[in-house]
């Protein structure tokens, strides 16, 4: 972020903490929403409080960027298991994440989309914006030569 390079950022997988096999999950997390992804990976859903702090931290880091920065927010899910009907769907936790971001993100360009992070249209929108940003920086550099 300090190099001034254009960046487009999103919020993938902030709905989960990864552990190893189910039996490796620490006992203090037994009451949490756990999802056995496969025999070697168990996921734990982040709480609204954890999500708010994650959002604040992402916002703080992005607000310190020295180059053009755009944040893309997938309002319909930050992972494939956080979309409606899936085990980590938790609108309150997601809203806490988004609120934490807005508290600290500062002047960063924010694009909210009613899509999930894995939707092709979301990826294309991010790629298009990055291309625009790189083109603009390249043009400015060429004019400065």
Image (cartoon, grey):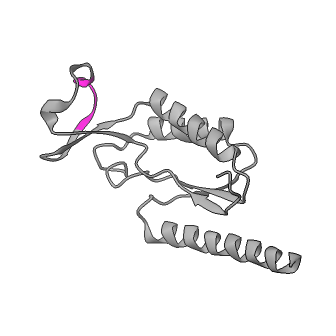
- Please determine whether, in this image, residue 11 is positioned above or below residue 91: below
At x 21%, y 30%, the residue is: 25
For residue 46, side relative to residue 20 (left or right): right
Quadrant position of residue 144? bottom right
At x 79%, y 78%, the residue is: 139
Q: Is residue 32 magenta?
A: yes
Q: Is residue 80 magenta?
A: no
Residue in front for this viewpoint, 59 or 81: 59
Pinpoint residue 64: horizontal percent, then vertical percent.
70, 44
Residue in front for this viewpoint, 140 or 13: 140
At x 86%, y 79%, the residue is: 145
Residue in front for this viewpoint, 27 or 125: 27
Pinpoint residue 13: horizontal percent, then vertical percent.
40, 48
- Please determine whether, in this image, residue 12 is positioned above or below residue 34: below
Pinpoint residue 124: horizontal percent, then vertical percent.
52, 73
The prevailing secondary structure element of the residues shown in magenta is loop
Instruction: Write the start and end of the magenta stretch as one range.
Output: 29-34
Residue in front for this viewpoint, 4 or 145: 145
Pinpoint residue 105: horizontal percent, then vertical percent.
68, 43
């Amino acid at each position: 972020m300090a190099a001034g390079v254009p960046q487009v950022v999103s919020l993938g997988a902030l709905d989960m903490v990864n552990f190893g096999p189910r039996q490796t999950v620490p006992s203090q997390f037994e009451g949490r929403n756990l999802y056995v992804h496969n025999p070697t990976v168990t996921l734990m859903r982040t709480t609204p409080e954890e999500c708010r702090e994650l959002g604040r931290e992402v916002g703080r880091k992005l607000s310190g960027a020295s180059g053009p920065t755009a944040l893309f927010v997938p309002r319909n899910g930050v992972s494939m298991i956080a979309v409606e009907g899936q085990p980590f769907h938790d609108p309150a936790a997601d809203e806490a994440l988004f609120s934490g971001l807005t508290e600290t993100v500062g002047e960063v360009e924010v694009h909210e989309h009613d899509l999930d992070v894995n939707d092709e249209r979301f990826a294309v929108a991010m790629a298009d914006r990055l291309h625009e940003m790189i083109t603009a920086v390249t043009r400015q550099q060429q004019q400065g030569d």
